[in-house]
Image (cartoon, grey):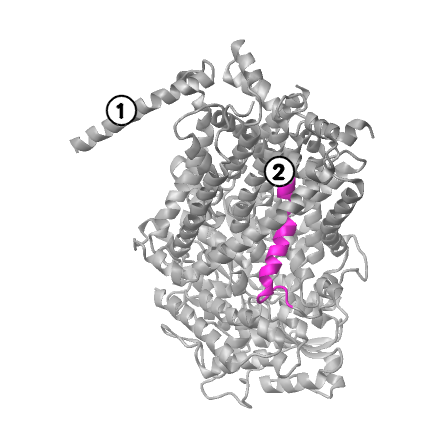
Amino acid sequence: MTTELLDQRNRRNRRNRRKEPRVKRAERKNRGVTERQRPLWLLTPGGLLMVLVILVPLALALWISLTDLDQYTLRRWIQAPFIGLDNYVESFDAGLLHSIWISVSFALIATAATVPIGIAAAVVTQNKYRGRGLVRAVFLIPYVLPSFVVATVWRTMLQPDGIVNSVLGSEGSLWLSGSRSYWTLILVEIWAAWPFIYLMALAALQSVDHEVHEASAVDGVTWWPKLTHVILPYLRGPVLLACLLATLNHINNFTLPFVLFGAPAPDNVNVMPMLVYVTSFQGLRFGLSAAMAVVSLIIILIPLFVYLRAVRLDVHEEGGRK
Amino acid sequence: MRNQKIIALAGVTVLAAALAACGGGDDGGSGGDGKTLDVLIGANTQYPEEFQAWQKSISDKFKAQTGATVKFEQFASANDELTKIQTSVVAGSGPDVYAVGTTMTPTAYSTGAFVKMGDSEWQKIGGKDKFNPATLGISGPDENNLVGIPWVSRPFVMAYNTDLLKAAGIDKPATTWDELRDQAKKMTHGDQYGLAVAYKDNFDPWKFVWGMSVQAGNPLVDGKTAKLQDPTVQKAYETYFGWLTTDKIVDPAAVGWTNPQALASFAKGKTGYFALTTSTATNSLEQGAVKGKWAFALLPTVPPGATSRPANGVEAASILSGDNLLVADYSKNKDLAFQYVKLVTDPDVQLDYYQKFGNLPANASALQTLSSDQRLGPVTEAAKKSVATPFTGAWSDIQLALTNVAVQSLPDLAKGSLSAQQIDSRIATAQKSAQSSLDRAK
Amino acid sequence: MSAHGEATRLLPRPLLVTITVLLCALVLVPISYIVLASLNSDVGVASGEFWPSSFSLESYHKIWTTADLSTGIVNSLIVCGATAVASALLGTTTAYVLVRYQFRGRLTILRGLVGLQSIPGTLMLLPVFVLFSSAGNYLGLTVVGTRWGLFIAYLTFALPFSTWVMVTYLRGLPRELEEAARTEGANTVTILWKIIVPLSLPAIVVAGIFAFLLGWNDVLFASVLTRPETHTAAVALQVFGSSQEGGALPVYSQMMAAALVCAAPVVILYLIFQRYLVGGLTAGGVK
């Protein structure tokens, strides 16, 4: 006990000592802003909300994943029997890895496809012309329609005797069942989600300074090199961030596959949120579904943090930029 | 700077508006009068105005009787409702009375969060005898543990095109599944099909399979054992899929149909039978080309491959379908809740509800007055010949597993061939998940 | 067009026109299907018609009684509007601290914020509900069923994203203005309000738009955290998708009409706010 305490104190001291030079560095950089003046209190409202509305429920979800919470124990959920890691073991039997694989691959393909569309849309609405406002608003529409409407519309259009088949002349081909359903999911997701990339790219384009355009005009650079070498680098940060968030949104998109394919879903599109939802709100096995969600969360978080380190999105680009 | 002010102004206004409007949680009130009873009920998109008017009239009657107000809360889908039940059960607060689909009653029962009906409770709502006895079949696991109070019935029937049947020289609708197939074959030619089936529906497939199996003597659940890997189930799936693959009496597009789409297709007037529907479809049928040329009929009650029902077979014309009322255990207004239940299960209210929305009364005497209605004859008969699905908390999983066999078979179905082995292996998967769910049932 | 316009042009005209037309078609073809379906009969839509056999505006009239759509839209506008403003402003202050100051755990916070984005909503639904309803049981605060509760939930879910949008943006802002202000004795709050907010308006608008849409499109949380009088538009819309088991046709045409009606306020808001997406930085010296 006492040694532990001592240990802790030592560690804390060491930490403080280590901090000193850093503070000094920061001071120099921030020209006179001392540690005391750092307005860290500004982080408290956001932090408090995160803790209350995300971290506490997340902890609760973790607890639930260790219990046998189902319809029989729901009413007295606090007393649900603790069963350790049993749910985690069972979740691998219940086709979780298959679902995660589908979710992740689907999300990556959808993101990869939406990026060029979104950037192209941002680039064509960059210059002012008559009716541009309208075009910009049109581009926003797919994003504004609730997922469940988008899914219902596409489901109706993709019926075997629906409009898509009669236009393509592929009478009776199945879009919503079997192996093709996977591509259907991707296509509909692309349709619904590209405006996200578009909005992010558009905002980033605005930050390209006018002088940059003028400089390349003076240099006589043609449009393609200008676009790829001069303009697109400006989009890198925001678009990378958009890709990341878009991918996460695709992975967690529940409404679209649920309304598009219904439950039970074809095996080819039994994405992770569907599995979690069906397990939890139709099968009423809350413990199991929480375990599934936790496993997939971990599986997603690992590459996410590797990616974050690799692209260095979050690293302060101090000094170099000014 | 101007921008900033606009944003600031907008922000403050919106936030203030949100703040100001957030006072009104429900405070319940105190004292005998002025209480509020929360009732969760399914949305009715077909007759929205009538539904609102009905809610108002019930609310007025209830106010006159008890002094309390009824507040209706609507849910959009079965999933929506289940989510609501679960969250309310966890929180121990929420609606006082739930209108719950019959097949969901076992699930609701298994949570133990609803009032069990004892003699005194039945007394409060006007006695158990006032209900059509068949409707009580899915109110609880046994006589002493009933939670569901029958409210309305929606038995399943077939609809058929009277003109097409006549043209094919058929004088009376089929009463066995084999007969149905043969008659449908006669009517299939050109762009005309004998039968409309919704293969992609999330609820229809299991109803066929359950019905055919029960008629052949297999109730699918025997105590704690799932009996899905059984010749009767196999035969049921073969028949059901065979309509499309071997008999070719169904439009190939039906692999993508949900029930409404099959209904729409039948309504065009080029299909002999629509295999699974309820009296609530009347309105949609009357809007289509089939207007005035259709009638309801009982679903076949003789299992496929047979000319008469085996000795242990049950004459199940439909699943016991409709809505039950459940009173929440956590409710602080139980007496009011029972008064509401009594009100809406009385004959006049029940008949009024039928006339407005096409749901059959669960009240026996109200149902009796309807049996003279020509078109409704088969439906009231189906209500009496409805059989309850097994009462177990595992039923929703079993239902899901049965449907999943159909869902995963759709691509093969579209290709036009489905081998017995494929069906068998999918049934085996369903059996496994059904059994594991039954094993956990308490 | 002036030389000014020519200089900023990114694409040759034919290409620009082609892409614009293609993208508009991509959006408008399905949209026109929705419009036509909203004018069609339910039977027509269900049987796969593109061009209605008969047109009727009836659905646009009926939707208001089928579901309490007007209440829903008002609620959505209030809750989502408040979420948009609050999360954009809170995101700006949080991002400002994260960008401008070095402190222990800064990177962890930044990465953690992205991590929070990957938590599936289906996992959080039950715990959030339990938490909110126990606030009612133990603290005497009514949270479930109020707009407050929904606002708090959306604000929290939107905050990581808003913060990140602002972080990427603020990082590119020059420090000179702030430092000048600081030497004149301005405190952090003043600097934020007078300098940072006006300068980063485009990003704030983007963050606000996304926060708004997050709430606008959510059904999962709204359906359990609201009561009839606080239902949002998305929840009201769901009613149109309902159909009774084995019963009648869903009211397809009403659903399409309602979807268009619900999309309209957002598109209009966007048309109003989109001019703030531009500018803001024109005077700055960011390279």
Between the C-alphas of marks 2 and 1, the distance is 44 Å
Q: Quadrant of the C terminus of chain C?
A: top right
Q: Of the residues shown, which amino acid type is indicated by label 1?
A: Asn
Question: Crowding at label 2, few (<14), some or many (≥20) Cα neighbours within 10 Å?
Answer: many
Q: Residue at x 60, y 84 (%)?
A: B175
Residue located farthest toward the front when viewing the structure as drawn: A219
- What is the secondary structure assignment of the residue under circle 1? helix
Which of C230 and A27 lies nearest the eye of the viewer? A27
Question: What's the magenta bit mostly, secondary-structure-wise?
Answer: helix
Mark 2 near mark 1, Cβ–Cβ under 8 Å? no
C82 sits to left or right of A171:
left
Residue located farthest toward the right when viewing the structure as drawn: C1
Which of C173 and C273 lies nearest the eye of the viewer? C173
Q: Which residues are magenta?
A: A174-198
Q: Quadrant of the N terminus of chain C?
A: top right
Q: Residue at x 77, y 53 (%)?
A: C58
Residue B88 visible from this viewpoint:
no
Magenta span includes B195: no
The image shows residue A129, relative to residue B256, as above or below, that is: above
Q: Of the residues shown, which amino acid type is indicated by label 2?
A: Met
Q: Residue at x 58, y 24 (%)?
A: C173
B427 sits to left or right of B77:
left
Res A200 label: 2
- What is the secondary structure assignment of the residue under circle 2? helix
Res A13 label: 1
Magenta span includes A177: yes
A185 sits to left or right of C110:
right
Residue A123: image quadrant is top right
**Residue B121: horizontal and vertical position, in percent?**
42, 59
